[in-house]
Amino acid sequence: MYKFFLKKIVISFLLLFFWTGVVSAREVILRDIILTTSKTNLLAYFTIDGCFTKNMQEAIFNGVPVTFTFIVKLNKKRTLFPDKRINSFKIYHTIKYDQLKDVFEIKRTERSEGVLTLKDFVQAKHIMGEVETKVAPLFRLKKGEKYQFSLKAELNKVTLPLYLHYIFFFVSLWNFETNWYNIVFTY
């Protein structure tokens, strides 16, 4: 009888452990990564998925700004020496909800458009997650050479004013960071 109850308890804990792991697992991924060239530049296009949680959306509607950081690196692959850095930069996408005007304000550092104002939150999330950027000028690349394009996304830590982070400790649950996505290509 004791073994029967012990088995039930162990199975219950295992199911609870695995069930909560599946439910709480939130995978933020970069997808649709495309590298191409224009007449003068190497260009990158990509999208981030799974980054807006319910708590984060509520905070945005309460006026808390949220910033995504995209880290981009381009290295020339070398066999006998360490890879040579061609370019490295960060892209910031910030969204803030203006409660008085009932609009979302989006600032994207890779674009010179200034602040983009939208009324639709679904469209604002879509724009926050799409990136189109210049990676490097083509004159810095040599034909026939191997290069590695690396990409990573993370949510900037939210800093709340007036020590509110002690009250709203749950904002640390928003933090995410993707793995590095690497593409090796020959130019």
Image (cartoon, helix red, strand yellow):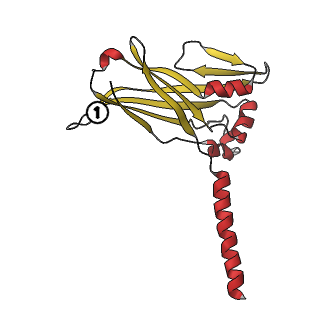
Q: Position of residue 53 (x, y in %)?
A: 68, 40
Which residue does the image show at 60% across and 20% down from the upper left?
107
Mark 1 nearby-residue class (10 Å; few <14, some 14–19, many ≥20): some
> Is 80 situated left or right of 114 in this image?
left
Q: Which quarter of the figure has residue 68?
A: top right
Question: How far across and how far down the image is residue 132, in percent?
Answer: 52, 21
Q: Is residue 100 above or below residue 13?
A: above
**Which residue occupies 51% across, 19% down?**
110
**Could you say which is closer to the camera, residue 34 or residue 155?**
34
Determine whether, in the image, residue 25 is placed left or right of residue 98.
left
Indicate the position of residue 143 as horizontal and vertical percent values: 27, 21
Q: Nearer the viewer, residue 160 or 181?
A: 181
**Snapshot quadrant of residue 184:** top left
Q: Amino acid at mark 1?
A: Lys
Along the viewing direction, whichever of 61 and 82 lies nearer the viewer: 82
Q: Residue at x 31, y 18 (%)?
A: 140
Residue topped by disc 1: 77
As drawn, 187 above or below 23: above
> What SS does tag 1 mark?
loop
Which image quadrant is residue 42 in?
Answer: top left
The quadrant of the image that shows the N terminus is: bottom right
